[in-house]
Amino acid sequence: MCRVEELNSRGKNDIKSERKINKLNSILRDSDVILSVTYYDKRMNASRQSFNKTRTGFRTIKHEILVFLLIMTIWDAAQINKPEPN
């Protein structure tokens, strides 16, 4: 990126070059802001997705525990109805 002082030392179309450089500088500043916002947004999406995966994993574990308790309850009920061996 050129600076205005460097253009003035060259001496060709100073005003036009200065305007172009200022325009380029403003575009670069705007694009830096856009890139940083995009990067921040991607990081937020990544953390949001990992949080959702954690919640889904927790639901899965909770579901497995409930299924295990249901199976154990049915198994206990089946054991009660069996006659005990002598």
Image (cartoon, rainbow, N blue to C red):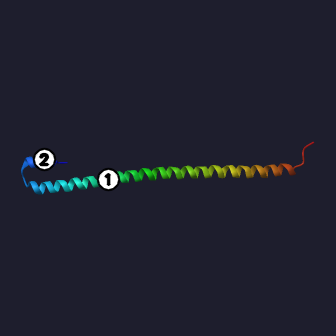
Amino acid type at image mark 1: Val
Q: Residue at image x 11%, y 49%? A: 7
Q: Where is residue 46 in the image (x, y as percent from the top left)?
A: 46, 51
Q: Which residue lies most toward the top here? A: 86
- Label 1, residues with CA under 10 Å away: few <14, some 14-19, many ≥20: few
Q: Which residue is tagged 1?
A: 33
Residue at the image position 22 percent from the left and 53 percent from the top: 25
Q: Which amino acid does label 2 sit on?
A: Glu
Left or right position of 19 against 65: left
Q: In this view, does 52 lie to the left or right of 81?
A: left
Mark 1 residue element: helix
Q: Where is residue 27 in the image (x, y as percent from the top left)?
A: 24, 56
Number of numbered markers: 2
Location of residue 38 (image quadrant): bottom left
Residue at coordinates 87% horizontally, 49% vertically from top-left? 82
Q: Which of 78 and 47 is in front in this view?
A: 47
Question: Tag 2 or tag 1, which sits nearer the N-term?
Answer: 2
Residue reaching furthest to the right? 86
Along the viewing direction, whichever of 60 and 79 lies nearer the viewer: 60
Q: What element carries label 2?
A: helix
Q: Position of residue 23 (x, y in %)?
A: 20, 56
| CA–CA distance in space, label 1 to label 2 | 25 Å
Taking 76 as reference, is 14 left or right? left
Marker disc for residue 5 = 2
Q: What numbered label is drawn on residue 10?
A: none
Please name the residue shown 32% across and 53% down the image: 33
Location of residue 75 in the rendering, given as x and y in whole percent from the top left corner? 79, 50
